[in-house]
Image: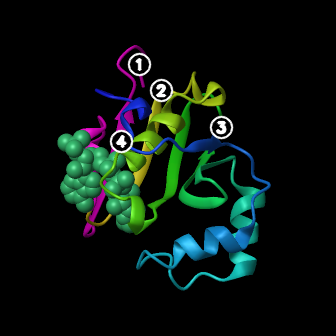
Amino acid sequence: MERDHAEMKTPLRFSDSREIDPKAVLALYRYADWSKDRTLEETQQVLSQSSLVFSLWEGPRLVAFGRVLTDFIFRAAVYDVIVHPDVQKQGVGRALIYKILTHPSLKKVPVFYLLTRDKRPFYEKLGFVTTEEEGYSSMIFVRKETKP
Ligand SMILES: CC(C)(COP(=O)(O)OP(=O)(O)OC[C@H]1O[C@@H](n2cnc3c(N)ncnc32)[C@H](O)[C@@H]1OP(=O)(O)O)[C@@H](O)C(=O)NCCC(=O)NCCS
């Protein structure tokens, strides 16, 4: 990572609690094609069953969300990274990924995966590299200081 969350224009509060209102997450899901049709029940399950849940807050408002499934030692997969359109292009997405990659519970994990359709340039700026398969770009982040 070249830069960190300190470069965000607006200071946001970070949380890794899964005890967040599923309706707030659902509201954020409405802004992305791949998540806009999700239900409240599905969102509740996402929150309760993911290994880790990450959020950034502007006052009481959820402005960024992401989650991870992981064994906490070898591999982690990043899902549902989404930033509210009002605060996009201000370093918030970068800050969220930084929080994920540096989270104390994920410190030993050498390899992070994610799938993206069209956000390769965003992830490449954060150190992910790309492989192409079946119309998807599969991306992987390998920590420099560890072997996969
Ligand atoms: C993709 C997304 C998370 C990026 O969040 P963001 O807060 O706008 O990103 P940042 O401001 O932190 O951008 C970090 C860098 O990536 C670049 N970037 C962000 N989105 C980009 C895009 N779509 N294409 C190219 N570059 C992009 C920024 O210009 C910035 O570059 P810089 O450091 O050289 O200035 C956000 O646009 C989003 O939530 N989109 C809708 C949901 C989605 O598609 N999520 C991805 C699922 S795989």
Ligand 1 closer than 8 Å to label 2 CB: no
Relative vertical location of residue 31 with respect to residue 19 in this rendering, above or below: below
Q: Which residue shows up at 54% across the image and 44% down it?
A: 12
Query: In the rendered image, which residue does mark 4 sit on?
Result: 140
Q: Does the magenta stretch include residue 135?
A: yes
Marks 1 and 4: CB-CB under 8 Å? Answer: no
Label 2: element kind: loop
Label 3: element kind: loop
Marks 2 and 4: CB-CB under 8 Å? Answer: no
Name the N-terminal-most of marks 1 and 4.
4
Residue 110 circle label? 2
Give the residue type at disc 1: Lys
Q: In this view, does 16 lie to the left or right of 133?
A: right
Q: How many marks?
A: 4
Name the N-terminal-most of marks 3 and 1.
3
Query: In the rendered image, which residue does mark 1 sit on?
Result: 147
Mark 2 burial class by Cα count in 10 Å: few <14, some 14-19, many 20+: many
Residue 121, given in percent of the width and then of the height, sits at 21, 51
Ligand 1 closer than 8 Å to label 4 CB: no
Ligand 1 closer than 8 Å to label 3 CB: no
Residue range corresponding to the magenta coloring: 119-148
Mark 4 burial class by Cα count in 10 Å: few <14, some 14-19, many 20+: many
Give the residue type at disc 2: Pro
Question: Marks 2 and 4, how far apart in space?
Answer: 10 Å
Residue 142, given in percent of the width and then of the height, sits at 37, 29
Residue 71 circle label? 3
Q: Quadrant of the N terminus?
A: top left
Label 4: element kind: strand
Marks 1 and 2: CB-CB under 8 Å? Answer: yes
